[in-house]
Amino acid sequence: MKKIIHLTVFLALVSALAGGILGYVNALTSPIIEEQKIAAVKASLQAIFTGTNDFKEISFEDASGDVINAYEAVGAGYAFNVEVQGYKDVIRFIVGIDNSGKIVGLEVNYVNDTPGLGSKVAEPEFINSIVGKQVDASLDVISGATISSNAVMKGIDSAAAVLGTLK
Amino acid sequence: MKSVLNYGMSLLKENPVFGLYLGICSTLAITINLNNALGMGLSVIIILTISNVVISAIRKITPDEIRIPVYIVVIATLVKAIELLIRAYAPAIDQALGIFIPLIVVNCIILGRAEAFASKNGVVASALDGLNMGVAYTLSLVAMSLVRQILATGIVDLSNPFTNTEIFSITLIPSQYTIPIFSGAIGAFLTFALLAAGISAIKNAEEKKLKGAK
Amino acid sequence: MELFSLFFGAVVINNVVLTKFLGMCPLLGVSRKTSSAIGMGAAVVFVIFGSSVFTYALYYQVLVPLNLQYMDLITFILVIAAFVQFVELILKKYSPVLYKALGIYLPLITTNCVVLYVTLFNITEGFTFVEMIVYSLAAPIGFMLVLYIFSTIRERLDLADVPAAFKGNPIALIVAALMAAVFTSFVGLI
């Protein structure tokens, strides 16, 4: 019995110490991690809306479940952080839509589909084919990367649907 | 010079990854490029060295019956601390390695060295052992990532994880001659199998030589 | 339908062994005999399912309210270790033959990356309770499937004439590469 108490106390002590250390590291790093997250999003937003510096996160309702965050670029338009299922992994991107419904920017942040095929959705050729069009216009699929490019378009449609509910 | 050669030889023969098949899950998964390999390798070196030191320091007061849970708690604490630090200061590595950073906890090399070495030896010796094993692990990761990255993309590049700026980038193979399959699962297994076979061939030759000498 | 594609995807397309490279140690270690492969697979299914439910509840009911999310790694690994101990006790008592066959690999389930991966993945993917249940069954079933197929191939491989340098694990990894080729060709089905 005494042995068991000794063991339990020892393990509890070690765990408590571990918790203390982690609490300290967490307190140290969590503000920086938050800043990093905001900075990463802000960099994308600024690349999309070059004219303004005033962004705020807004709440929204999304029936498709693809849109993760929505941001308002005050006076310029809206940006949506979207995650869709690509060919073998998710694709994450931020799409900016201005007040007239024109796609003003597309920043693909994460794609893990086949290099040379699905990965093309992150390349300028595809992005340039989308930027500048109206959200309801038909967009061109990349041959050889049908699933990945369709996934991105589905995500843009979801973002446009959310935009519709905001107005 | 001879000691360097000896070190190289022991690195080959007692290699934790290709010789003993420890920690291969992460080896296969993250060796897509040099950046990931170095990021993972450095994290493991730091965690392995500190965990060896801590476990060696508390080896006399740790009750034998619960030593494994205690080791696990020590290792998990270190890994989580490193994970938080990486996320804060080098988000690029966090993005690239993702869930494989927390999975360092179950990298057999770390618990293996804790049980086989640190629990029986002094603090300084354990620190050196951790450093040594970590470096061997990192070199294995680098070797594998170089093979895969060069064959799959034709480019070798390295960027500073803290600032996200490129340090160098060399194109070795024009893009029309690359083999993208090497960045995927099949390439990972094949590369590993061939490197492991190469090392076992060296070992076999060495053994034959020893027998011949007798 | 979503749940079915989650299940099928986790078993075949995103197979934890062949596409995420997890659980390689038991794959190379206990896959020499079909019977121990099945035993190991079943033990892993049980451990993953049990510890997933446990860690999921623990995370959302205890750690999140207390704002202690950073303790996830420690609590998860301890829950897994305790669960493995539990399975070991049961097997020792009711199936000594299997216990002997699995030998040292049973305690090693603790450090089997699949278990920790699934419990962490449930959280990072933000799964609902039902999705978590489906995924925690599908992932280890995928593991078991590969372990079983692998063991049937390896039984044959023991009789084959393999170049000296490839004997043992290297040729097994070549087999794994070929199996990965087969499994990844299912990509795009869902």
Image (spheres, coloured by chain):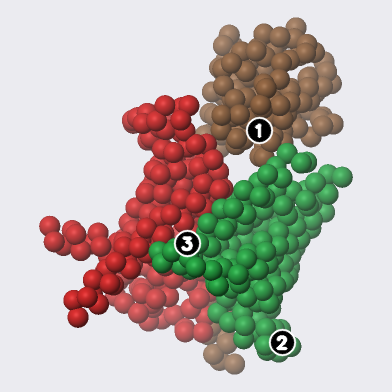
Chain colours: A brown, B red, C green
Residue picked out by circle 2: C95
Q: Secondary structure at mark 2?
A: loop
Residue B58 visible from this viewpoint: no
Parent chain of label 1: A
Q: Chain letter for mark 2, please.
A: C
Q: Which residue is mark 1?
A: A91
Nearer the camera: disc 3 or disc 1? 3
Image height check: is C104 above or below B44?
below
Task: Tell me which numbered mark, 2 or 3, is placed earlier along the sequence.
Answer: 2
Q: Amino acid at mark 1?
A: Ile
Q: Which residue is mark 3?
A: C170
The answer to whether mark 2 and mark 3 are in CB contact below 8 A is no
Residue A51 in percent (x, y) is at 58, 8
Q: With A115 as the anchor, is C129 left or right in this view?
A: right
Instruction: Tell me where residue C6 appears, x and y as whole percent.
Output: 77, 48
Disc 3 is placed on an element classified as helix
